[in-house]
């Protein structure tokens, strides 16, 4: 049950078919084989009201990857962030850089590492006179 009324964003991430239902209404319908894809849906929810959430998934070939999340819509890109971006001459947005979603992968045959929890961006500004 949501603690606050408002707009919420629902996320699924899957490497094959996924469907999300909210109170038996289809919110996300991506029922086909594909590589890992993020789908989103927005819904207004009322505080204290229970909602039935159902996630359906199928795997065609390979490893199983499926994820689900929900957040307040303004948390996705907050009001303060939008206000700052509106005043800026340029904006750089990076998403997905946190230890919960980024992993290190080490296998017997490879030392591949996918560690992107830190990001450095070199920005060069020039003016012409």
Image: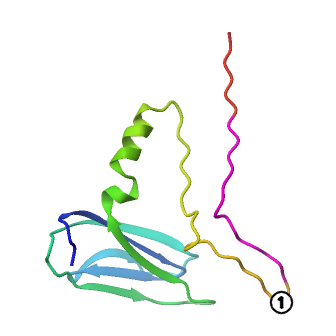
Q: Quadrant of the C terminus?
A: top right
Q: Position of residue 58 (x, y in %)?
A: 47, 90
Q: Position of residue 50 (x, y in %)?
A: 17, 81
Question: At x 58% / y 76%, what residue is drawn?
Answer: 35
- The correct choice, above or below, for 75 with respect to 52 in the image is above
Question: At x 35% / y 72%, what residue is drawn?
Answer: 70
Callout 1 secondary element: loop
Between residue 54 and residue 100, name the one nearer to us: 100
Q: Position of residue 111 (x, y in %)?
A: 83, 78
Question: At x 56% / y 44%, what residue is drawn?
Answer: 92
120 in magenta: yes
Does 10 sit left or right of 89 as displayed?
left
- The correct choice, above or below, for 98 with respect to 68 in the image is above
Q: Quadrant of the N terminus?
A: bottom left
**What is the chief secondary structure element of the magenta stretch?**
loop
Does 71 sit left or right of 121 as displayed?
left
Residue denoted by label 1: 108
Q: Position of residue 113 (x, y in %)?
A: 76, 73
Between residue 84 and residue 13, name the one nearer to us: 84
Question: At x 79% / y 86%, what residue is drawn?
Answer: 107
Q: Which residues are magenta?
A: 110-123
């Amino acid at each position: 049950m949501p603690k606050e009324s408002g707009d919420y964003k629902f996320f699924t991430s899957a490497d094959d078919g996924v469907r999300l239902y909210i109170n038996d209404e289809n919110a996300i319908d991506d029922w086909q084989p594909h590589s890992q894809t993020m789908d989103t849906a927005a819904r207004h929810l009322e505080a204290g009201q229970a909602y039935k959430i159902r996630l359906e998934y199928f795997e065609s070939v390979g490893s199983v990857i499926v994820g689900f999340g929900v957040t307040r819509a303004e948390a996705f890109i907050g009001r303060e962030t939008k206000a700052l971006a509106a005043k800026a001459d340029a904006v750089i947005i990076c998403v997905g850089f946190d230890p919960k979603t980024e992993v290190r992968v080490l296998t017997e045959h490879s030392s591949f590492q996918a560690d992107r929890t830190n990001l450095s961006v070199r920005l060069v500004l020039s003016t012409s006179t």
